[in-house]
Image: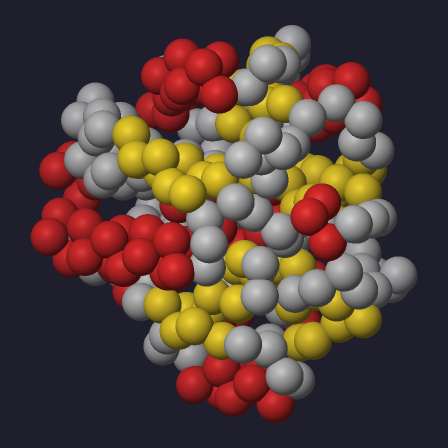
Amino acid sequence: MSPARSVYRFNSAIVREPSRSVVDGLRAEERGSPTYEAVKAEHDAYIAVLRDAGVEVTILPALESFPDSIFVEDPALVFTEGAILLHPGAASRSGEAAEIAPTLRDMFETVLDLPAGFADGGDILATPKGVMIGLSARTDRAGAEALIGCLDRLGHKAELVATPEGVLHFKTACSLLDDETVLSTARLARSGVFKDYKQIIIPEGEEPAANALRINDILMVPSTYPRSLELLDKHGYKIIPVATTQIEMIDAGLSCMSLRWYRDDK
């Protein structure tokens, strides 16, 4: 795989401004409520890191009717070869794919629709060896199997894996660090899903740091997990700490806030 096509090499991204309704975003447990102003500050800082990493960012307007719509990764997948409109598994998010569809159709020659079931982008991890689709409360088997067919049409092989019970999304518990290495919680690593990869295990008690985000030569890591930051620094990654305290209150992490791809015509 050429450097330009590596799964963490990006020059384009789509984000969506947070709505004021973001304070009502979905959450599995009560960990306090974010404020709109603080979420927007985290989002603005996130965009700045993407741009500093060499990514051209398209910013879509806020959608007040969809509190979780800042998390654009869930209603769609994007690759150099095309995009896939998904069906998020939460009822309150069922209209988000239709909202982002016009933008994707403007930017991609090929845009596919998931033909059956439910699938969230947060359950989908692209690696150099293929795409992992985590079955979860938000991604069912029908959606995952339909997604395998869509991915095949774009030239990507995929496999079904299990998201640990009680974990919202597969990528809540893992992220890709480089072509050979994944960052994982100990619980997910014990499942054996990453047996073909080098693994770096998140320190106990800092599990949300597993949702890091590799962008070109930098690694975005949640800023409030010092042992994880130190561990990744010792492994030689160029770390950019990014605040996520507000979005974590509504069950989100770094990967959730953007759709990222390498655009050949740039």
Report the number of numbered marks: 0
Q: Is residue 172 visible?
A: yes
Compared to residue 88, the image places residue 128 above or below, namely below
Compared to residue 225, the image places residue 125 above or below, namely above
Which residue is located at x 70 percent, y 38 percent?
Answer: 133
**Residue 250 % position (x, y):** 31, 49
Compared to residue 227, the image places residue 165 above or below, namely above
What colour scheme governs how the chains and residues are painted in the rendered image of this protein? secondary structure
**Residue 114 % position (x, y):** 62, 15
Q: Is residue 89 visible?
A: no
Q: Residue 35 versus residue 131: which sits nearer the camera?
A: 131
On-image quarter of the C terminus: top right
Which residue is located at x 13 percent, y 38 percent?
Answer: 20
Q: Residue furthest front?
A: 266
Quarter holding residue 158? top right
Q: Residue 80 versus residue 44: which sits nearer the camera?
A: 80
Q: Residue 248 versus residue 231: which sits nearer the camera?
A: 231
**Residue 258 % position (x, y):** 43, 42
Which residue is located at x 79 percent, y 31 percent?
Answer: 156
Compared to residue 14, the image places residue 143 above or below, namely above
**Residue 248 % position (x, y):** 34, 58
Q: Residue furthest right?
A: 196
Which residue is located at x 43 percent, y 85 percent?
Answer: 226
Q: Is residue 91 left or right of residue 115?
A: left
Q: Is residue 160 left or right of residue 244?
A: right
Q: Is residue 63 left or right of residue 175?
A: left
